[in-house]
Amino acid sequence: MTSHRATVVIISKHERSLAETLDVLRDHESRIPKDVVVVDASDGALDELISGHPEVTWVPFTAPAGSRKQITIPEQRNAGVRAATGDVVVFVDSGCRPQPGWLDTITAPLLDGSEQVTVGSYRSTESGPYDLLDFSDGYVHEAPTINMAFTKAAYERVGGFDEAFSYGSDVDFCWRVNDAGMRIRRIEAAAITVDWGRGRRQHKRSWYYGAARARLYRKHPSRLRQLPQRDPIMLVYPVFLLGLPITLVFPFYPLLLLVPLWRSRRVHPVQTVSDHLCYGAGALAQLVGVAT
């Protein structure tokens, strides 16, 4: 690669936790030079952060005129890449805290040319249902942009993030990366911590993710055959919810949930299963045209 520089991109909308992430990045030591770009859709609500972080390139974002979308995540991601000066682009979310060595670790395979897309690990700042996820090294079929890096060449090859999505454009990006013959390398040591939130915040996120998942399969119908093996939650929970009327005849039908409760007994079982139910409800809402 001709340029050994990375651009860290953060998209934000009314997220005051952005300040914490910028503070960590300002002090983050790395061998590779870096610049930071924030694409902010807060309509000036976070402008007080600008003066405190002169090292950051601030890109105000306003949804295009006539757009009915309330969520502009892929549009902001694309704007961030356009503003990036490095050949390597690294995404991290507001509120995340990159750990020592993070930037050098996640970009090293991109700079030496061995990989085109890498993702790091993420852990909750508090105990939660994601604490026991497998973050071992290897290759993955998809990952969120919460901790992702790629070359601009890879981004351009697949055409960036699909702005037809609200949520789910990061998974769509990954699927198209794989379809283009590139692999996604997971690097456990490239670590960040994040506050996932609890209760209502988590349920709302799960609903949106379920709706996005259904839309993903509409765009990529060839992947439906992978549902039982790679995406059983997307199959099991919508089917369970569709079967709830059976309770009128078989009142013990909801007891089927005891199976996933038992299987997730070490990972906050009630929260995990309730999140999955919201996920399934979001998927059904998308399939019947309620979710956008």
Image (tube, grey):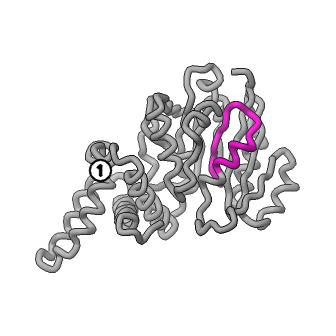
Which residues, given as a range, are shown in magenta? 77-94
Residue 105 sits in quarter: top right
Local secondary structure at mark 1: helix
Q: Is residue 220 above or below residue 274?
A: above
* Percent coordinates x, y for residue 76 in the rendering: 66, 53
Is 152 placed left or right of 215 in the picture?
right
Kindly identify which residue carries mark 1. 232
Q: Residue at x 77, y 30 (%)?
A: 33
Is 170 placed left or right of 11 in the picture?
left
For badge 1, the amino acid type reads Pro
Q: Residue at x 79, y 65 (%)?
A: 44
* Percent coordinates x, y for residue 200 in the rendering: 49, 70
Instruction: Report the front residue among 107 and 61.
Output: 61
Residue 270 visible somewhere in the drawing: no
Instruction: Report the front residue among 14 and 30.
Output: 14
Is 250 placed left or right of 194 in the picture?
left
